[in-house]
Amino acid sequence: MILEIVSPEALLFKGEVTSISLPGVVGSFQILNNHAPIVSTLKKGTIKIVADNFSFKKEVVEKFKKINDQNYTLDIDSGTIEMKDNKVIVLAD
């Protein structure tokens, strides 16, 4: 599935991912390939991204924390997520 993470300042990430875990306002949840459509709000917490390959712009790479070659995290204060047609868009603050 395709993941886009957008902040008010910039496009933070766009790429093919295996899974994404998110801090939902009513509890954390995970989205996998071919997940049903969903729209949700996010609370302060950590987004966990799993992918085979990562490519970051040098301007935003410091916002992400590398766990290992296939796992990165991103801390957010709040946000919104939409999953539709195997594309996830996260609007993060």
Image (cartoon, rainbow, N blue to C red):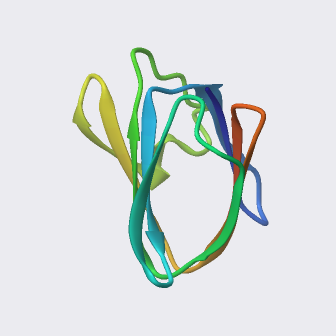
| Residue drawn at the location 61% of the way across and 26% of the way down | 1
Rendering coords of residue 55 (x, y %)? 54, 22
Q: Where is 61 relative to 46, above or below?
A: above
Q: Is residue 25 left or right of residue 72?
A: right
Rendering coords of residue 77 (x, y %)? 52, 80
Please state, as top left, top right, bottom left or bottom right, where the C terminus lies in the image. bottom right
Q: Is residue 24 left or right of residue 34?
A: left
Report the front residue among 35 and 13: 35
* Residue that lies at the very extreme toward the left in this rendered image: 68
Q: Where is 18 relative to 91, above or below?
A: above
Q: Is residue 5 left or right of residue 64?
A: right
Rendering coords of residue 66 (x, y %)? 28, 39
| Residue drawn at the location 78% of the way across and 33% of the way down | 85
Report the front residue among 5 and 84: 84
| Residue drawn at the location 46% of the way across and 84% of the way down | 26
Report the front residue among 56 and 26: 26
| Residue drawn at the location 58% of the way across and 79% of the way down | 78
Say how many tags the image has. 0
Q: Is residue 93 visible?
A: no
